[in-house]
Image (tube, grey):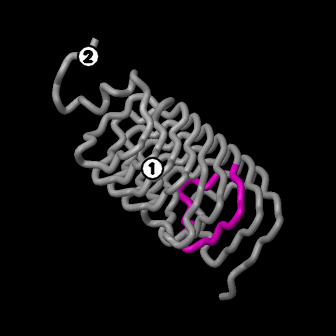
Amino acid sequence: MATELNEDEDFNNIDYSGQQLAKHEFANCTFTNCNFTQANIAGVDFMDCSFTNCNFSLAVVDGARIKDIQFRHCKLMGLDFSKCDNFLFAASFENCQMDYCSFFQKKLKNTRFADCSLKDTDFAEADLTMAVFKNCDLLNASFVRSNLEKADFRLASNYSFDPELNKIKKAKFSYDGLAGLLAKYDIVIE
């Protein structure tokens, strides 16, 4: 079966939930109000696409290629981004619900997370060099052996991780967030 190429197209209000979209390639497409809940997008190629008000909860993304993708106001609950193809992986996230996601060992240099909920998200061993977490809730997010050099946490909330288990050179934090870096010492900060 040949790969179906979709280029410069707009997709609106389409319900892909539970469907299998293998052998599809989308280039410079926009998706608005589309439902990908529990869809199988394994191996699908998305390049220079934008998603607005879309739901990807529990979608299967194994081997999906995500290249220069923008997610805005999307629900991405429980996605395992670590299973996406690593080659040219690049995405930005704005106003997204991303709780219980995994970015384990993902290269996320310069990735921008703005106004996102990232509760219980796994960033273990991820490369987040120069990543920005603007107005993001990182409650119970996991950072272990992660590269956080030059990452910006100044406007993030509820993060807590051990600086000794991560690379944090030149990372930026607010005074309010310092307690999350000292939690392992069980000290009182007033």
Horizontal arrangement in the rendering, residue 89 relative to residue 30 (left or right): left
Residue at position x 41%, y 49% in the image: 149
Horizontal arrangement in the rendering, residue 10 relative to residue 181 (left or right): right
Q: Dot 2: few (<14), some (14–19), or many (≥20) neighbours within 10 Å? A: few
Residue at position x 50%, y 49% in the image: 130
Residue at position x 45%, y 42% in the image: 99
The magenta segment is 35-51
Q: Residue furthest top?
A: 190
Q: In front here: 145 or 94?
A: 145
Q: Please provide percent x and percent y for residue 105.
A: 38, 61
To which quarter of the image does residue 11 belong? Answer: bottom right
Q: Please provide percent x and percent y for residue 97.
A: 54, 40
Q: In front here: 129 or 180?
A: 129
Q: What kind of residue is marked 1?
A: Gly
Q: Residue furthest bottom?
A: 1
Q: Which residue is mark 1?
A: 78
Q: Please provide percent x and percent y for residue 155.
A: 50, 29
Quadrant where the C terminus is found in the figure? top left
Q: Please provide percent x and percent y for residue 133.
A: 51, 39
How many numbered marks have been drawn onto this rendered protein structure? 2
